[in-house]
Image (cartoon, rainbow, N blue to C red):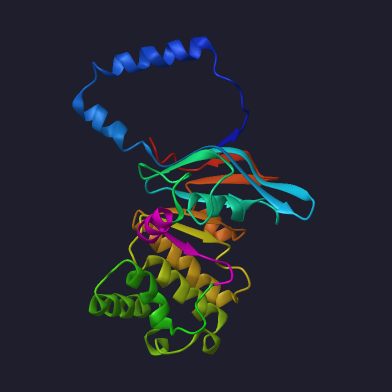
Amino acid sequence: MIIINIVLEKENSSDNKTRKSSLEDNKDRSENDLLKDLTKKPAVYCKDLVKDFEIGDYIVRAVDNVSLSIYNGEFLVIKGPSGAGKTSLLNLIGGLDTPNSGIIYSFGVKISDMEQESLTTWRLLNSGFVFQNYNLISTLTAEENIMFPMNLSGVDFKDQRKHAMKLLANMGLSDRREHLPFQLSAGEQQRVAIARALANDPPLIIADEPTANLDKKTSQFIRDLFKELKNNIRTIIIATHDDYIISLADRIISFEDGRIIQEEIINDIKN
């Protein structure tokens, strides 16, 4: 286990010379080495992210100059106290919100300054969200909630339904497919929400306290789902206080007052 305390400092000219020399050396390396390096490129790259919210006469900075790289297949846990800005950071990374300043590249696409319509389309295909409060559409059945993102993406209706039924079966909810959210328990609603997040088979899964307020049995079911997702080489970013989910992490980030204050590397996924 490696503990890294984050220290921000400016690059000096000698760093630039070293970097330039390193780039020149790359020309002489084998093709296999270069191909290997391509897999090390971040799936998500964030630089100097700032997110402010206006509350009355005050400006609250929820994300304060955050820079972060997340790699393909990485299971990244973000932990920190309530109000630290974790949810705001997740929303920026997943394209639910845009930063006041800074840049975000996700799977090679710059999303930080996308027009809203383009961002919505990108989000549908590339990121699946699991919210603490489920955020199911109250007028749609469990099956219809799962079909909803597929419908927005233009998937054929028969394929929508077939995939939704498969996801419901995987969640142990085949007999709940025609139930509205209010007819489902909290744990069942969260399982529907996870199925919805997986509906378009996105490369990135983002979850915000997915086991909060759930009973012990349901929490373990959700934990096992995330373990399975990790085994399927998904890129997962999750804010949680759940010790079991934290134990699955390749890297743990401690977040306070809108800033990364520490990184703990368990499995260096990029090497």
Q: Tell me if I can see residue 113 in this picture.
A: yes
Query: Is 130 left, or right, of 29 in this rendering?
Result: right
Q: Residue at x 63, y 72 (%)?
A: 213
Question: Whole-percent x and y of residue 77?
Answer: 54, 51
Q: Tell me if I can see residue 69 in this picture.
A: no
Indicate whether 35 appears above or below 160.
above
- Magenta residue check for 130: yes
Q: Nearer the viewer, residue 271 or 174?
A: 174
Q: Nearer the viewer, residue 17 or 174?
A: 17
Indicate whether 141 appears above or below 89.
below
Q: Quadrant of the C terminus?
A: top left
Where is residue 204, by image quadrant? bottom left
- Give the residues drawn in magenta, as a range: 117-134
Question: Whole-percent x and y of residue 60?
Answer: 72, 48
Q: Residue at x 31, y 38 (%)?
A: 39
Q: Nearer the viewer, residue 196 or 269?
A: 196
Question: Whole-percent x and y of residue 235?
Answer: 40, 52
Where is residue 173, by image quadrant? bottom left
Indicate whether 94 appears above or below 61.
below
- Magenta residue check for 135: no
Residue placed furthest toward the left: 31
Question: Whole-percent x and y of residue 102?
Answer: 54, 38
Q: Nearer the viewer, residue 147 or 189?
A: 147
Q: Residue at x 31, y 14 (%)?
A: 24
